[in-house]
Image (cartoon, grey):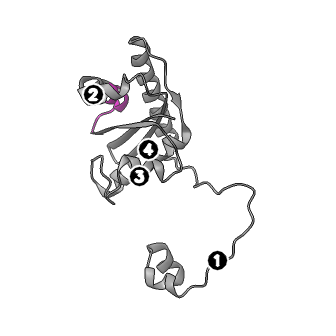
């Protein structure tokens, strides 16, 4: 019963628990790596490749994959899927800046592209082409200042939620 209360975030239960002892650690604890399936991992890689092809086509350097940034993107795609919404503002009120900063990722400039599709068998070309046809998304893809990217895909049924984050440290 107590475990159930703790996992739901019940503040009243937390008030009566003694603090946990500090255990020595060699390195800071990292959240577990979030992945959905090998198929969604392939979609993430294909989106990175498609975006980098566009950048090279326009004379820009390819973006380097940042797995920590991809974890932020995956968590956000998962949140949109589970809460059934699509917005740059999270269901919890979070912003891009807060989501990236809360993971301890420092940056000079950061950007975000979102895409969702239902009943589309090939989400990669749909996302890349869709972003390239949208002025704001295209600007993020072709912004010379960005050096790194993280792509997170989450699938629920026949709907894909895709988040691509851009970053310069």
Task: In the rendered structure, find residue 98 and report the number of the disc placed on it.
Answer: 3
Task: In the rendered structure, find residue 73 and report the number of the disc placed on it.
Answer: 4
Does label 2 or label 4 sit earlier along the sequence? 4
**15 relative to 40, above or below:** below
Q: Position of residue 71 (x, y in %)?
A: 50, 46
Does label 2 or label 1 sit earlier along the sequence? 1
Asked which quadrant contains residue 66, the reply is: top right
> What's the distance in space between the residues labelled 2 and 4, CA to CA?
18 Å
- Circle 3 sits in a helix, a strand or a loop, which is it? helix
Q: Position of residue 145 (x, y in %)?
A: 43, 25
> What's the distance in space between the residues labelled 3 and 2, CA to CA?
26 Å
Magenta range is 117-128
Which of pointers 2 and 1 indicates the residue nearer the eye?
Answer: 1
Confirm or deny contact between disc 3 and disc 1 (CB under 8 A). no
> What's the distance in space between the residues labelled 3 and 1, CA to CA?
27 Å
Does label 1 or label 4 sit earlier along the sequence? 1
Task: In the rendered structure, find residue 20 and report the number of the disc placed on it.
Answer: 1
Q: Which residue is mark 2?
A: 130
Please report the residue visible at 31 percent of the width from the left and 58 percent of the height from the top.
93
> What's the distance in space between the residues labelled 3 and 4, CA to CA?
12 Å
Please report the residue visible at 31 percent of the width from the left and 26 percent of the height from the top.
139
> What's the distance in space between the residues labelled 2 and 1, CA to CA?
49 Å
**27 relative to 16, above or below:** above
- Residue 152 vs residue 92: left or right? right
> What's the distance in space between the residues labelled 1 and 4, CA to CA?
31 Å
Q: Position of residue 40 (x, y in %)?
A: 46, 39
Q: Is residue 165 visible?
A: no
Confirm or deny contact between disc 2 and disc 1 (CB under 8 A). no
The answer to if 45 sits in the magenta stretch is no
């Amino acid at each position: 019963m107590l475990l159930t209360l703790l996992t739901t975030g019940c503040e009243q239960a937390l008030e009566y628990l003694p603090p946990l002892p500090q255990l020595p650690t060699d390195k800071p604890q990292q959240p577990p790596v979030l992945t959905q399936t090998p198929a969604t991992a392939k979609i993430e890689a294909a989106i990175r490749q498609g975006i980098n092809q566009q950048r090279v086509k326009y004379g820009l350097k390819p973006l380097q994959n940042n797995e920590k940034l991809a974890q932020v993107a995956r968590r956000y795609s998962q949140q949109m899927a589970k809460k059934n919404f699509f917005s740059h503002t999270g269901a919890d009120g979070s912003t891009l800046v807060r989501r990236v900063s809360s993971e301890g990722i420092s940056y000079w400039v950061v950007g975000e592209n979102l895409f969702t599709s239902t009943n589309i068998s090939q989400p990669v070309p749909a996302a890349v082409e869709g972003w390239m046809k949208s002025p704001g998304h295209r600007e993020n893809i072709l912004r010379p200042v960005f050096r790194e990217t993280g792509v997170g895909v989450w699938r629920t049924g026949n709907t894909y939620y895709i988040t691509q984050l851009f970053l310069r440290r």
